[in-house]
Amino acid sequence: MAAAVTAAVSLPYSNSTSLPIRTSIVAPERLVFKKVSLNNVSISGRVGTIRAQVTTEAPVKVVKHSKKQDEGIVVNKFKPKEPYVGRVLLNTKITGDDAPGETWHMVFSTEGEVPYREGQSIGIVPDGIDKNGKPHKLRLYSIASSAIGDFGDSKTVSLCVKRLVYTNDAGEVVKGVCSNFLCDLRPGSEVKITGPVGKEMLMPKDPNATVIMLGTGTGIAPFRSFLWKMFFEKHEDYQFNGLAWLFLGVPTSSSLLYKEEFEKMKEKAPENFRLDFAVSREQVNDKGEKMYIQTRMAQYAEELWELLKKDNTFVYMCGLKGMEKGIDDIMVSLAAKDGIDWIEYKRTLKKAEQWNVEVY
């Protein structure tokens, strides 16, 4: 059972705030030779025949054991036709006024009826109907809180949502249906929740693992849930003693999400938590290139490659799809120095649940 949480939710932004193959083994089909029946065997030069009876046994399959915290996980308890109806407890903007777009942190009541895990997602069914007069379809969002929630009582779930507003080719302003519905919610409002869903982003079981987290924008959500469990909570059955390394990419410093929380974690566990920001519109590397998440990672490329050779290193990627190619570009040449095909090696990492991706 988890003890009380030791940190509060970040307040709204203020300018004053500071190599083995990893696959399961299937035993080859075994030949079993039974008693041989001998007829007309050659004796004293006379030639006869020998008949041997051969039977086979079915292959023995070895059950693969997951490296993730998946015991007792609940999936799809609530569906769109019968969602759980929660209430908004908190909804606050966590980006600065000059940030390119708004991002909100919101907390919903669940009364313990939506038992999720770190790394899972929930669906939200926005109020209203679509252009065809039908209820809106659900949208999935990565959960931004640990399993016991921001208040430590296992009765809430939190999301990190960016308000989607853009101008289309016809010059019309388009607003994302669900993101604007969520960002406009006020405390006390009802919200229809489905799920929880997903197993791809579950945390590793090994408390001594190296966990490398790569997030852009609201892709930070599952990593906030990981890090709260690792550094802000006390659990009888889990104590993180490994290395958590977070890379967060955003366009401006006023877009850095949960910055104060992560800095507190760094103060609490400097040996176990590394934190690197990539602010693309404000930072450049030695070559004068914009500092995207893959640009920041390139500064640690050799070290990251050495970590990726270990069986207890887990990589999690969440956010914009484009960053995956940039990371591949870094690793291809590093792996080649060791005579390794990076794309093939990445496949073995995926099979071993050590390379986990949820991008859009």
Image (spheres, rainbow, N blue to C red):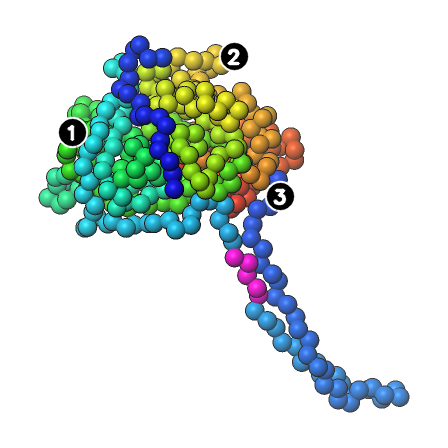
The percent coordinates of residue 322 (x first, y second) are: 41, 30
Q: Earlier in the sequence, mark 2 or mark 1?
A: 1
Rendered residue at 42%/47% (across/down): 70
318 horizontally vs 204: left or right: left
> Which mark is in front, 2 or 1?
1
Q: What percent of the width, then of the height, locates residue 79?
A: 24, 49
Find numbered disc 1 in the image and state the secondary structure of the residue it sits on: loop
Q: Is residue 62 magenta?
A: yes
- Residue at mark 1: 186
Q: CA distance from mark 1 to mark 3?
A: 52 Å
In this view, 19 is above or below 8: below
Discs 3/2, front = 3
How many other residues sit within 10 Å of disc 3, few (<14), some (14-19) or many (≥20)? few
The quadrant holding residue 281 is top left
Q: Residues within 10 Å of mark 2 (few under 14, many from 20)?
A: few
x, y percent for residue 96:
28, 16
Name the residue beneath numbered marker 3. Answer: 20
Q: Which residue is mark 2?
A: 286
- Answer with mark 1 or mark 3, whichever residue precedes in sequence: 3
Q: Amino acid at mark 1?
A: Arg
In the image, residue 315 lies in the stretch drawn in magenta? no
